[in-house]
Amino acid sequence: TKKSDLPGDLVGEILSRVSMTSLGAVRSTCKKWETLSKTRILGASAAARKQFMGFMMMDFRVCSLKFDLEGIRNDEEEEDFVGPYVKQVSILDHIEISQVFHCDGLLLCVIKDKEGLVVWNPYLGQTKWIQPRTEFDRLDVYALGYDKNRNHKILRIFFDNRTVLGYEIYDLCSNSWKVVNVTLDWSIRSNQRGVSFKGNTYFLARVGYIDDFLVCFDFKTHSFGPLLPLPYGKGHLSLSCVRDEQLAVLHRSFE
């Protein structure tokens, strides 16, 4: 029997038993498995029903958030709900979390008070704790992405008094940190949150004191791409991703 001939329910059962670090490799072995797994990763099925599903922070706790994009729905396959639905994630309720980052169905959680990182797979209910190579700092910037083999990795940009000290990559498969040697003539602010898009992460960068560039970190090559100018003047900028299909930049003028 070929992998592509297996029924969807059986494939779902197989995927549910695969470890977090091996899921990407297993998904890449068969196009049908890749398609089925995409319907199960975070938010994919909800998006198909014109719903939004994601996560939000409340009092240093991670909560799941779901609401209908077109009013009240009455789907037989799930509980009815009216308006936003918010529920605290029980598997993470024993730790305080300061930041969360989402990529490819995984959630990277930054633990408050510099204690470490934890990667959570909501579909499999698995968590993976990550210890630092050097002490974490509250100003550190993180990003979650994956390479061409779908191996997930974490980028850490670490700071000292708002000055960048260096860059390093954590490989979830090898459980190891690697220093990334780059010299840049621009900077990312210590409070800047990147956005994951198709395995890479995009940041808002600045030259001097002007925030008007978009830059991509490529997890395949462990390098930053060229600065991409934005068609805006000075103002407040924010990045977001729409269904992992489009990258959006929100601009609000200072004026």
Image (spheres, helix red, strand yellow):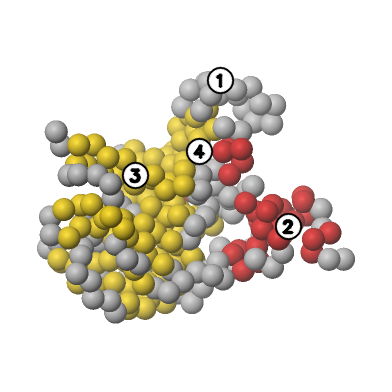
Q: Residues within 10 Å of mark 1 (few under 14, many from 20)?
A: few
Residue 87 placement (x, y as % from top left): 46, 35
**Residue at position x 29%, y 79% in the image:** 181
| Residue at the disc numbered 2 | 32
The answer for how far apart the CA atoms under marks 4 and 3 are is 20 Å
Q: Is residue 20 visible?
A: yes
Q: Secondary structure at mark 1?
A: loop
Q: Quadrant of residue 32?
A: bottom right
The answer for how far apart the CA atoms under marks 1 and 3 are is 29 Å
The answer for how far apart the CA atoms under marks 1 and 2 are is 33 Å
| Residue at the disc numbered 4 | 53
Nearest to viewer (mark 1 / mark 2): 2
| Residue at the disc numbered 3 | 249
Nearest to viewer (mark 2 / mark 4): 2
Q: Is residue 172 visible?
A: no
N-terminal of the pair, mark 4 or mark 1, is 4
| Residue at the disc numbered 1 | 72
Nearest to viewer (mark 4 / mark 3): 3
N-terminal of the pair, mark 1 or mark 2, is 2
On the rendered structure, is 231 left or right of 9?
left
Nearest to viewer (mark 1 / mark 3): 3
The answer for how far apart the CA atoms under marks 2 and 4 are is 24 Å
Q: Secondary structure at mark 4?
A: strand
Q: Which amino acid, mark 4?
A: Met
Tell me whether the residue at label 2 lies in contact with that at label 4, contact meaning CB atoms closer than 8 angstroms.
Answer: no
Q: Which amino acid, mark 3?
A: Val
The answer for how far apart the CA atoms under marks 4 and 1 are is 15 Å
Q: Quadrant of residue 111?
A: bottom left
